[in-house]
Amino acid sequence: MSDAAAPQTSALSQVELDAFTSQLITAIKTVFDPEIPVDIYELGLIYKVDVADNKDVKVDMTLTAPNCPVAGEMPVNVKAALELVDGIGEVTVTMTFDPPWTPDRMSEEAKLELNMF
């Protein structure tokens, strides 16, 4: 049997990955949309967070609108917040507008905060 057929195992245990992911979410929740008093995680602006075995992190995110005045700042703010997480590797934040953000992506917490019920 060749090595290529061997199952891939992660250098991080599930417990370690869960704890690290929790730290990442906590860091992301420190970044707020300047026009809306809710953090970007609860707004549903974070589409994906990938963690590599060496704790490099790749984030796909969006904004509430493509012409948002902080489009250039927001990925920088997310990267800076994540880089404060102990033990994190390289952080890459990519902006996407596919699919476009809609209020349906917001958490119940965000909807309550904004009285959207």
Image (spheres, helix red, strand yellow):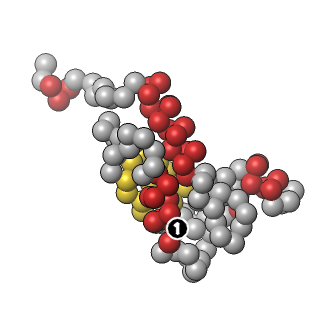
Residue 100 x/y as whole percent: 58, 67
Residue 52 x/y as whole percent: 34, 41
Residue 98, visible in the rendered structure = no
The residue lying toward the viewer, choosing from 40 and 89, is 89
Vertical arrangement, residue 104 with respect to residue 4, above or below: below
Residue 14, visible in the rendered structure = yes
Residue ID at (58%, 80%):
69
The residue lying toward the viewer, choosing from 48 and 82, is 82
Q: Is residue 55 left or right of residue 45?
A: left
Q: Is residue 44 left or right of residue 71?
A: right
Q: Is residue 115 left or right of residue 19?
A: right
Instruction: Determine the secondary structure under disc 1.
Output: helix
Residue 102 x/y as whole percent: 66, 64
Number of numbered discs: 1
Residue ID at (42%, 41%):
86
Dividing the picture into quadrants, the one containing residue 10 is top left
Residue 116 x/y as whole percent: 83, 60
Q: Which residue is mark 1?
A: 74
Vertical arrangement, residue 50 with respect to residue 30, above or below: above
Vertical arrangement, residue 101 with respect to residue 108, above or below: below
The residue lying toward the viewer, choosing from 102 and 87, is 87
- Looking at numbered disc 1 in the image, what kind of residue is underneath it? Met
The residue lying toward the viewer, choosing from 90 and 115, is 90
